[in-house]
Amino acid sequence: MFKYLMRFIKALNANSHPGDIAHAVALGLLLALVPKGNLLWPFLFILAMFIRMNKGAFFLSFILFSFIVPFADVPVERFGNLVLSLPPLQPVFTQLYQTPFIGLTRFNNTMVAGSFTAGVLAYLPVYLLVRILLSVYRKKLQPLITNSKLYKLFTRIPLIKKITDMSGIGGMHS
């Protein structure tokens, strides 16, 4: 976990593309929402590993969102029930269920359908929000933090220097 945290901090402060971090956070939320006991989750996880994104931000956001997601179980299940009971989608769900291996994704489960649909619907807003927040952080907050006396004092601590040197985070100490 420490390795992913350091990669995330490095990406925040580096010149890495904000879209890579935003995709990682949005995918982390999607995977945290989807229940793990079906074929859909490993498929999405493997697919996520092939997408160009910041893996540190992905794993960190996945872990953090996994702690929050259980509080959304009831609304997500109700949303899944709503999605699965939509009359125009009934023939689609019937056809999917009769397709080999698709039934193993358990898309017909209200939790799986609700969480996957909620994650897909939340993807774009989360992506845009993270890009905006990252832009604000890099333009306004990062210079304030790195020029503060507390930050300069903190980075003079030998243990912190060693950690930043080992992790490859450049510009963390003066």
Image (spheres, rainbow, N blue to C red):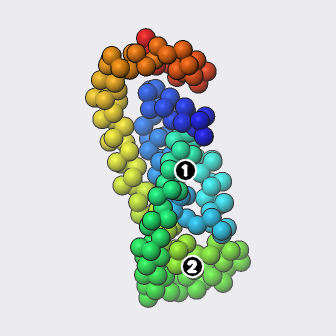
Look at the numbered disc 1 and give the secondary structure of its residue.
helix
Q: Which mark is residue 109?
A: 2
Q: Residue at x 43, y 56 (%)?
A: 123
Most distant residue in the top direction:
174
Occupied quadrant, residue 138: top left
Residue 67 percent coordinates (x, y): 51, 56
Q: Amino acid at mark 1?
A: Ile
- As rendered, which of 104 and 147 lies closer to the eye? 147
Callout 1: few (<14), some (14-19), or many (20+) C-alpha neighbours within 10 Å? some
| Helix, strand or loop at mark 2 | loop
Q: Nearer the viewer, residue 157 or 15?
A: 157
Quadrant of the snapshot with the C terminus: top left
- Identify the residue shown where x is 59% and y is 35%: 2
Circles 2, 1 touching at the beta carbon (< 8 Å): no
Dot 2 amino acid type: Asn
Residue displayed at 32% across by 42% down: 132
- What is the spatial separation of the Cα atoms under label 2 and label 1, in whole angstroms? 23 Å
Q: Quadrant of the N terminus?
A: top right
From the viewer's perspective, is residue 19 above or below residue 38?
A: above
Counting other residues with Cα less than 10 Å from the Cα at mark 2, is it few (<14), some (14-19), or many (20 or more)? some
Identify residue for label 1: 63
Of callouts 2 and 1, which one flags the residue occurring earlier in the amino acid sequence? Answer: 1
Q: What residue is shown at x 62% (from left), y 75% (from top)?
A: 106
- Can see residue 143? no
